[in-house]
Amino acid sequence: MAHLTQITSLAEYASFVQTAAGKTILLAYWPEDSTSNAVVTALRKQLPSSTYAEHNVVDIYCFDVYALPELGTMLDVSFVPMLMWFMDGVMDPIVWHEGVAIEGESVEKGVERVVKRIKGAEIGEEEDSDEDW
């Protein structure tokens, strides 16, 4: 997780995420977890740091749920990994974790749904059809 900004305390969360102007992305993860690593890979591929300014993204942060269980509780993290994002310190309701994955959806596709929302897509703008259900 070295390529994401690591949050190691509640004070850092308050400073980096809650008071940020713009979009911040936060990943709750388990260390050495393959699904957590897949989320990071998909996120970096779909939202490279070179595009942050274009999409008003301040940074991508992560925190180890083992090390900061109180932050996980405060954010209602019920599935790990959990990808969430904030606009001006307020969490958006569109998050990704395996509990909200569409049946058969890969981690990359789930992350893509959140990244599209971060980039400004409205809910329901995807090119879904009734046949997908």
Image (cartoon, rainbow, N blue to C red):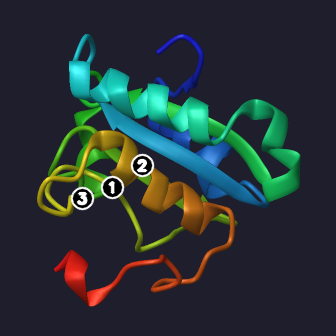
Residue at 58%, 23% (x, y): give it: 4
Kindly indicate whether the residue at mark 3 contacts the one at mark 2 (C-beta within 8 angstroms): no
Mark identifier at residue 111: 2
Q: Position of residue 77 (x, y in %)?
A: 23, 51
Q: Secondary structure at mark 3?
A: loop
Quadrant in the picture for the C terminus: bottom left
Nearer the N terminus, badge 3 or badge 1?
3
Nearer the N terminus, badge 1 or badge 2?
1
Q: Which residue is mark 1?
A: 96
Quarter-of-image position of residue 15: top right
Residue at 49%, 44% (x, y): give it: 26
Residue at 30%, 27% (x, y): give it: 36
Vertical position of residue 32 compared to residue 52: above or below:
above
Q: Which residue is mark 3?
A: 76
Horizontal placement of 44 versus 8: left or right?
A: right
Vertical position of residue 40 compared to residue 83: above or below:
above
What is the C-alpha distance between the residues marked 3 and 1? 13 Å
- Name the residue nearer the viewer: 48 or 60: 48
What is the C-alpha distance between the residues marked 2 and 3? 19 Å
Vertical position of residue 126 compared to residue 11: above or below:
below
Kindly indicate whether the residue at mark 2 contacts the one at mark 1 (C-beta within 8 angstroms): yes
Q: Check disc 1 and give the amino acid type.
A: Trp
Q: Position of residue 128 (x, y in %)?
A: 38, 79
Q: Is residue 123 visible?
A: yes
The crowd level at tag 3 (other Cα within 10 Å; few <14, some 14-19, many 20+) is few
Q: Is residue 56 visible?
A: no
Residue at 52%, 37% (x, y): give it: 43
Nearer the N terminus, badge 2 or badge 3?
3
> For the residues carrying marks 2 and 3, which lies nearer the camera in this image?
2
